[in-house]
Amino acid sequence: MKHSARVWRPLRALAPLALLGASSSGCVDVFRGAIVQTNWTTLASNAPDEHYALWATVNQGAVRLVQFKVVDAVDHTAEGRDHETCGGDPLTTLDVQRVQAWAPDFDAAQVCDPQTRVGTIDKVDVQSATLVGGARWDVSVDLRDAEALFLTRAQDADPEEVPGAVVARAPLGDERDPYAEVRDGCLRDYCAATPDDTRPTPDPCDALGVRAPRRRGTLLGTWLAVPAASACAARPLGEVAVVPAQDETVF
């Protein structure tokens, strides 16, 4: 399902963006749009009547990319969890958090419709010893100049026309995650201040200087919970990669 992008302009006007809808095949035009692939290791399920919105910061303006819900596949209300749920049978349904596309006119059936599913929050399936997770969107917004992505949460009855309270943010770097440098600096300070014999096993200091290779044509980032007392206190929530469609790269 396609949703129109909404652009919020700050005091300095946002440069016009070229918008073009994704094709029915799930591909995006070679000169427009982008693929957004994110793996959240943790993200809270929505409370009833609540949703998330994914935004991009482009040319000093905020562009809403998609709206979605994170819902529990299995009903956990008996355990005191006040979460949106699809009420699946725990004997036959994998107990995961589903990421579902959402629009203001969706009813309860559409919220849990497999056709609107875009992924799941990362979870290890113990029985098969495999990692289940990942969400992907083909968006119509040109993200070649995107500086960051951020996530807001709002009530279903009051969808955001401008960004509300930010719950997570992911600064983007060209071919390399900018958080890697921040993480190395924090780890370096920790290693300098912590004697070898008091560090946990495995020693986190062994990861100093270890960097993922560059990924051509891709913007990379780490999701960080907002707010955070300091850069080193920021809580990573997962990773994200953005592929501008003109690169023709696929995951």
Image (tube, grey):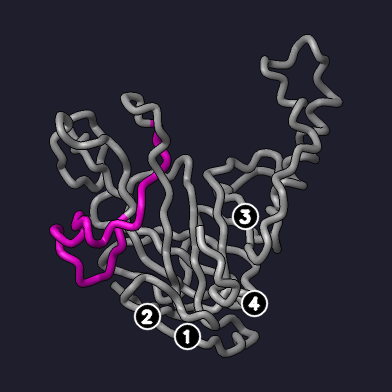
Of marks 2 and 1, which one's residue comes earlier in the chain? 2
Instruction: State the image quarter where residue 43 is shown.
Output: top left
Which residue is identified by label 4? 60
Reading the image, the residue beneath label 3 is 221
Label 1: element kind: loop
Mark 2, residues whose alpha carbon is within 10 Å: few (<14), some, or many (≥20)? Answer: some
26 versus 215 height, above or below = below
**Residue at (55, 71) in percent of width and height:** 248
Determine the CA span between mark 2 and mark 3. 24 Å
Q: Residue at x 45, y 76 (%)?
A: 28
Of badges 4 and 2, the one in the foreground is 2
Q: Which residues are magenta?
A: 100-124
Residue at horizontal 70 percent and vertical 45 percent from the top: 212
Q: Position of residue 246 (x, y in %)?
A: 57, 77
- Which-is-in-front pick, marks 1 and 4? 1
**Which residue in the protein does label 2 denote?**
4
Q: Amino acid at mark 3?
A: Gly
**Element type where label 3 sits in the image:** strand
Q: CA distance from mark 4 to mark 2?
A: 20 Å
Q: Position of residue 135 (x, y in %)?
A: 41, 54
Identity, as a three-letter code, of the amino acid under mark 1 = Leu
